[in-house]
Structures are given as structure tokens and as C-alpha cells.
Image: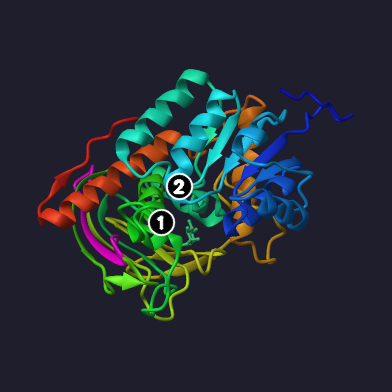
Amino acid sequence: MTTDVTDTGIRTIRSGFLGAGFMAHVHTRAARAAGAELAVVASSTPDRAVRAAAELGVRRAAADAADLLTDDVDVVHVCTPNATHAALALQALDAGKHVVCEKPLATSLADAQSLAAAAADRGVVAAVPFVYRYHPMVREARARVAAGEIGALITVDCGYLQDWMLLPEDDDWRATSTDGGPSRAFADIGSHLCDLLEFVSGERIVRLTARARTVYPERGGHTVENEDAVTLLVELSSGAIGTLLVSQMAAGRKNALTLELHGTRSSLRFDQERPEELWIGRRDASQHLFRDPQTAHPGVARFSRVPVGHAQGYQDAFNGFIADVHAAIRGDQPDGLPVFADGVRAAQLTEAVLAAAAGGHWVDVPVLLQ
Ligand code: SOE
């Protein structure tokens, strides 16, 4: 693999990108911000790859994935439709590359597990963009929970609401089971919510039950086989209980990921659309805490990527994630880097949600991989 060394002694990481849609734009911006060389991109057709290379500022357009993998890149970013993730990520692992694979890692738990096993065998960095972990106020919440500041967890009240599938004419590859997979709302955004809940609380969802709705049976002339919305009741490892509402049909809600934890001493609330703040709920004096590296919990300051008072958001979180992927490639072990085991966890929760929604019963969710 490449070993360019600049005069600072930091090796330039060469990155390849599979896919050229919305997420490839986010990934390339983050890789560029982390100092990577944007070496090569492949898309669904060679022509699209040529256009994407020009648009994204990537050096070479590859004819296809196999051609991309002949390139001397260190890391491959998989940003293609869901159903292709597992096979492409495996090809990249087989070619000896580090991999950043979009979620869901695979459209079945079994495929996600074999992919994680393959990555573990190769000993490479294999990461999944659960990037909301990279908001400084999420890390602040996690540090406060770990320090016992909220006391014992009693309940959680969480949601992830969007509206881009509200109208019957709204359609997307994610709404087909062939490209999107058997779950849509949960696999696409519910997975982020559960990841964040487990990450911040330090607990696991041990049991759940769910109800799902597919509002329009057809969109764009095809049958819709995955859900628009799902609601969950969960029980966490400590015995805490809670509710989660996930929908892509909540008019007016664009990317409303909210996480609220209620402990025996105080509560915490994070709202992704107001990522610079953390609400601390107390019986006597609730407060809004604003991002400030000077007053942040030890270890949290590094997640502040722009000066205090200058709004930091989604792309900054993504940039932080990719910076940590690069650090891991260079041999560090960044705290809280979401890896394939976290992708397996999401796949496991997705299967549990689908089973619970279909059968109307409670499902146990043991931890498979740490
Ligand atoms: C679309 O629902 C989407 O782009 C998700 O796929 C992302 O994971 C989420 O971060 C924002 O919404």
C-alpha cells in the first residue's frame, strides 16, 4: 500500500469511493478535510464515474469496482445502494484495503456477521458511519452518563423523524426491497437512533417489541415492501424502559433525531437539529449547555472542530469520523470509532424489529459481538 511521507512525517492516505450519490459527496468532503488524496471513484456506469470524478474532485474515474480495486488505495468507501454493500465491502477486504462501509452493512444479519468476521480476519480498519457519535454534545452526554451525573437510568424517550417519503409520489431506491432491503425506516435511520442510545447510555437494548406501517403499498409503479414508520418499546440492560418513534413520513420533520434520557438525578436531551446544545433537566433548575471545549468534560474537547460560537454540524461530525478512521489506519485506537461490530449490532436490531413487528411479540436481543 501507499507510503507517501510528507515532511511532517504524516503519511498521505489514498482513498477510493464506490458510489457517486449524496453520501459519496459527504464522504469525499470528509476525506479531503482529513488530508486524504481522493484517488479514484467508480459508479454504476463508467460515464457516471467520469462525471462524479469531475464533480467530486477525484483524480481517476474507474470503469467499475474491480478496476477501482487495482488502484493502490489504502481505504475504500462503500457508498452504493444498501443491497450491494456486503459484496463490495468483501471485495475491498479481499484486495487488502481498509473499508468504510455505509449502513446497513448488509441487508441480512448473517451477511453482516460474515463481513465483520472477514474484516477481523484481515486485521484492517473496518468502520461504519454512525457519525452522530461525533457531535461534541453527544460525547458530552456520554461522559456525563458514565460519570454517574444523571444517576441510574429510569426511562428513555427517543425519536428519529424525517418527511421525505410523506407523499404517495415520493420514491427512492431505498423503498424497493431489492436495492433497499427488507427494512427501510429502521435500517436507514432507526439504526442511527439505537446506536446513539446504546453509545450514550452505555447500556444495551436487551428486549424490544415493535409495530410498523407501510402507508402506501405502491410508489413509483413498484410495490413497497419495507416500512415507512416504526414504533418500538425497549428494555435496556439496567431495566430502564423506553419508547422510540422512527418515521420518514412525519410532515415538517427533516432530520429530527432526539435522544432523551431520564435518570434518578437528572435528565439529558440531545437534538440533532440543534447539535450545539445539550439540555440538562433537573427538578429545580434545568439548563441548556452549549458546546465549549474549555468547559467540556475531559476527552470531549477534541470533538470540537470549529471555534466556540461558530455553529458546528453534520459535515463536521462526518469529518471527525473520517479523521478517526485515518488515525486508526495509522495505528491509533480512537475512542468510540463505530466499527463493523456496530454494523452487526444494527443488523441484529433490524431483524429483531422486523420479527417483533410481524409477530406482535417481544424479542430478546443478546449481544453478539463487542
Ligand atoms: C436518509 O434517510 C439519510 O441520508 C440517512 O441515510 C443517513 O444515514 C442520515 O444520516 C440522514 O438521512
Q: Residue at x 49, y 64 (%)?
A: 272
Do the CB atoms of the residues marked 2 and 1 lie less than 8 Å apart? yes
Does mark 1's beta carbon lie closer than 8 Å to ligand 1? yes
What amino acid is at disc 1? Asp
| In the foreground, 260 or 48 | 48
**Image quadrant occupied by the N terminus:** top right
| In the foreground, 13 or 294 | 13
User: Where does the magenta region start and end?
Assistant: 224-239
Mark 2 Cα within 10 Å, few/some/many (few <14, many 20+)? many
Which residue is disc 2 drawn over? 103
Does mark 2's beta carbon lie closer than 8 Å to ligand 1? yes
Helix, strand or loop at label 2? It is loop
Magenta stretch: residue 365 in it?
A: no
Which residue is disc 1 drawn over? 188
Which mark identifies residue 361?
none
Q: Position of residue 129 (x, y in %)?
A: 52, 46
Q: Is residue 29 left or right of residue 128?
A: right
Q: Residue at x 45, y 35 (%)?
A: 340
Q: Position of residue 86 (x, y in %)?
A: 44, 38
Give the mark count: 2
The relative height of residue 38 versus residue 158 in the rendered view (above or below) is: above
Q: Residue at x 71, y 31 (%)?
A: 71
Q: Is residue 314 visible?
A: yes
Of mark 2 and mark 1, the one earlier in the sequence is 2
| In the foreground, 27 or 149 | 27
- CA separation, marks 2 and 1? 7 Å
Q: Position of residue 338 (x, y in %)?
A: 48, 40
